[in-house]
Amino acid sequence: MRVSLIVLSVLFSYTLLSQDVVSTKFGKGLYNVVSKDSSWSMKFGMRIQSLYVGEWDINDATGIGQGSSNFMIRRSRLKFGGHAFSPKLKYKIELGLSNKDLGKVDSRGNFAPRMILDAVVKWNFYKNFTLWAGQTKLPGNRERVVSSANLQFVDRSLLNSKFNIDRDMGVQLRSHFTIGKQFLVREMFSIAQGEGRNLVQDNLGGFQYTSRIEILPMGAFASKGDYVCGATKREEKPKLAIGVTYDYNDRAVKDRSNQGSYMSYDTNDDGTIDGYFMSNISTVFADLMFKYRGFSVMAEYALRDADKVDHEETNDDGTVSTASVAVGSSLNVQAGYNFKKNWEVAGRFTQVSLTGKDKYEQYTLGLSKYVVGHKLKVQSDVSYRRKDNSPDSGLMYRLQFELHF
């Protein structure tokens, strides 16, 4: 809270100086600050998500069991962006303030909350080539790169939670070109540290290399709609985007590439970390987005493999420390129709298969009311999840309110 007040105080102090404040529309930021000589600018925005979750276990023999419920602030964020010195040099800063955003503290992050989500500079140094430097999302699966403010359901799918490569610190090179009048191609390449965001200690393993290519054969979507879920913008002509990503994490020390838990061991059995298991982990994503008028479809496939999946180390006392890389595959398909009154009905099917664990499927039905697009909306969904070879399954209901200034 103290950090938030300091940030707000600094921002409002700018408005008291001789700068130009440009008014904006709802959802486009609280305000823009532009210097008189136009050498720099800053747009400030904020957003909140209030969430209710109810869950129930289901057993084939006993039926629906006792449920649980939870109310939370799912996301609460401050966002800053603009340019410095030249419009070709842009920046983005995003801070997460909710407990879900901050995550767990550990020694690799100096036992500090992980407040910084994005802190990245983007330099358009030559024609359609842009160099990114800092901490931000890697060019991984489409659903992860889509902002959590622009989702079709209350939250992302199980494919994303088990396979995404999220944010990291490093550099990215991005470019695009057009073939003919509208066939658009985008290329992205990233080198990152390979352990996720907000680290302050030396890299334990190697680096993480990510390449992605996208083709949009029918041209660009309205308002960058290929990275906005749902058909809040009604495309008058069919639009299609196809993307493929290959990610290689050299000597990764986490069980889900740069995400998940550290694969550490304690050979002295004294509670301290003596070393880390390492694997070369490869992840492949393939995805598409299609929109036409009020109809939308998004599909994704993920595959993760490693040169060494299972690890073990014998401790001094004869016990064995073990760790495994979460390898496997997943498929997610979702579709919806947004009526002219901005009520959207959507369905989603997700399948996850991890080696050594049960395969499970989840079916989700969602209903959303877009008051001002994704900037002011109410969303709800109900999900049914079942496991193979298991009598147990689960039912979940969620209701969420989003406000984005």
Image: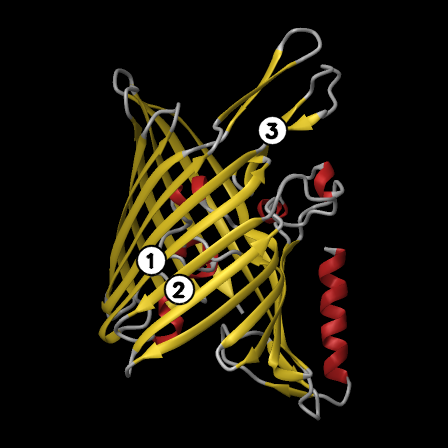
Pinpoint residue 137: horizontal percent, then vertical percent. 53, 57
Above/below status of 388 relative to 163: above
Amino acid on which disc 1 is placed: Ser
The disc, 2 or 1, on the residue closer to the chain's N-terminal end is: 2
Closer to us: 14 or 311: 311
Which residue, given by chain and number where applicable, does mark 3 sit on?
Answer: 277
Q: Residues within 10 Å of mark 3 (few under 14, many from 20)?
A: many
Closer to us: 84 or 322: 322
Above/below status of 300 relative to 42: above
Q: Where on the picture, by quarter, is residue 203?
A: top right
Quarter of the N terminus within the rendering: bottom right
Which residue, given by chain and number where applicable, does mark 2 sit on?
Answer: 227
* Residue 18 relative to residue 284: left or right: right
Question: In whole angstroms, how far apart are the C-alphas of marks 3 and 2?
Answer: 36 Å
Q: Residue furthest top?
A: 318
Pinpoint residue 280: horizontal percent, then vertical percent. 52, 38
* Residue 173 relative to residue 301: left or right: right
Which residue, given by chain and number where applicable, does mark 1 sit on?
Answer: 368
* Residue visible at 59% across and 49% down in the picture: 101
Amino acid on which disc 3 is placed: Phe
Pinpoint residue 23: horizontal percent, then vertical percent. 57, 84
Residue 228 visible somewhere in the drawing: no
The disc, 1 or 3, on the residue closer to the chain's N-terminal end is: 3
Pinpoint residue 180: horizontal percent, then vertical percent. 28, 82
Colouring chosen for the image of the structure = secondary structure
Quarter of the C terminus within the rendering: bottom right
* Residue visible at 30% across and 54% down in the picture: 367
* Residue visible at 33% across and 57% down in the picture: 368
